Image: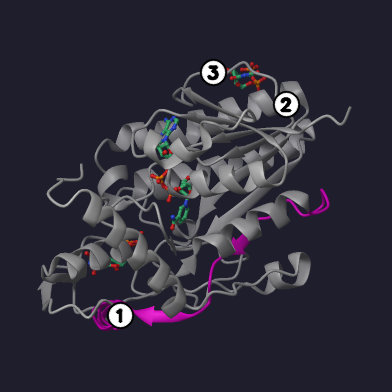
Amino acid sequence: MMLRKRILVTGGAGFLGSHLCERLLREGADVLCVDNFFTGTKDNVAHLLDSPNFELMRHDVTFPLYIEVDEIYNLACPASPIHYQHDPVQTTKTSVHGAINMLGLAKRLKAKVFQASTSEVYGDPEVHPQPESYRGSVNPIGPRACYDEGKRCAETLFFDYHRQHNLRIRVARIFNTYGPRMHPNDGRVVSNFVVQALRGEPITIFGEGRQTRAFCYVDDLIEGFIRLMAAPDELTGPVNLGNPGEFTIRQLAEMVIEQTGSKSKLVFHPLPADDPQQRRPDITLAQQKLGWQPTVPLKEGLTKTIAYFDGLLARLPNHVFQ
Ligand code: NAD
Ligand code: UDP
Ligand code: UDP
């Protein structure tokens, strides 16, 4: 009898986690999804519940977890500024205590463990585009620090467990990713603009909209996760995963308006504190070591994302998303 690989995905009921669970099931794994449903929902994985190879468990990763698995993907952490700033102390705890618990679990089981790190470790970068060797420019006491510094400390823990306990680790630095199952009201720019355009509400641009981001479609990102996990153990990372196509926020707003055919107008709000002015991944390492690069251009990814939100809003026209 062939033994199926048993894989833990923390934060598996979130946006990226639900796509990862789906992909791992398709590849023939047994998937244990662990989530405290802070920003994720059962709805995101409802279509997987019928699978005999899928299990869903409510659990907060800041508490120890004693289970048996072969591999761990640690994604648990609120990812949008509104959500991670809602309870900043809990955000840092989730990154730091969550990492310690998942690393302790991996150590006991001798399991390979993957960390969803972030481009936010580069802060408001003075080097552009950002290679993995850039050490970043993070304000340690600003409103984004709970997320940025929590993720930086998690990386430190991953590398110390690797050096001290020979743990097999993989660290991905994820750049802005979008797609179906983003939370409609978590304040991230793609979901905000698409929902606003579909509802005919004003499109809220922070600052003058000249700041840039590079947007990766979710399927491309998940392919990068799978390749990094499967790579030789020497490739611990950190590895940047993102789409190098860079756009100003104003350009994004215009694309969304055009693709939805919306009559929404642009409105300008103050730029939040410590908002990075520019961001674009240097993905040379992923290209060379994983043979990976994104394949879905922004226009095509937006079409799929717009279709998802269109369906969601049609199903729940008057719903206030929390
Ligand atoms: P998300 O908010 O949709 O998913 C995070 C999931 O973690 C949610 O299901 C949430 O309920 C769960 N969670 C939060 N705290 C938890 C805790 N203490 N215990 C258990 N579960 C907990 O966000 P996402 O976009 O899917 O992000 C997933 C991961 O990828 C996060 O670690 C995030 O930092 C990282 N990341 C995402 C992006 C992006 O653009 N989407 C970019 C960089 C990094
Ligand atoms: N841990 C866990 N599951 C396990 C093993 C450990 O959640 O199967 C947690 C436990 O709470 C511990 C942490 O991981 O505090 C770190 O474990 P480690 O063995 O590195 O350190 P120690 O147990 O000595 O604190
Ligand atoms: N942004 C915006 N309008 C919005 C939401 C976000 O102009 O309604 C801007 C935000 O100020 C930032 C960029 O879009 O410059 C990306 O924001 P997001 O929160 O999606 O990601 P992050 O800042 O974490 O990269």
What residue appears at the point 77 percent right and 66 percent down from the top-left corner? 289
Query: What amino acid type is highlighted by mark number 1?
Result: Gln
Q: Residues within 10 Å of mark 3 (few under 14, many from 20)?
A: some
Q: Which residue is mark 1?
A: 259
The answer to which of 201 and 111 lies nearer the viewer is 201
Q: Which residues are magenta?
A: 231-259
Under circle 2, the secondary element is helix
Q: Could you tell me which quadrant the C terminus lies in?
A: top left
Residue 68: percent from left, percent from top = 70, 20
Badge nearest the viewer, 1 or 2: 1
Counting residues from the start of the chain, the first of labels 1 and 2 encountered is: 2
Picture quarter with ligand 3: bottom left
What residue appears at the point 31 percent right and 82 percent down from the top-left corner? 255
Q: How is the image coloured?
A: one colour
Q: Is mark 3 within 8 Å of ligand 2?
A: yes
59 part of magenta stretch: no
Residue 97: percent from left, percent from top = 49, 28
Marks 3 and 1: CB-CB under 8 Å? no
Q: Is mark 2 within 8 Å of ligand 2?
A: yes
Mark 2 to mark 3: distance in Å? 13 Å
Please indicate, yes or no, whether residue 102 appears anywhere in the rendered image.
Answer: yes
Under circle 3, the secondary element is loop
Residue 170: percent from left, percent from top = 69, 47
Q: Which residue is mark 3?
A: 64
Query: What amino acid type is highlighted by mark number 3?
Result: Pro
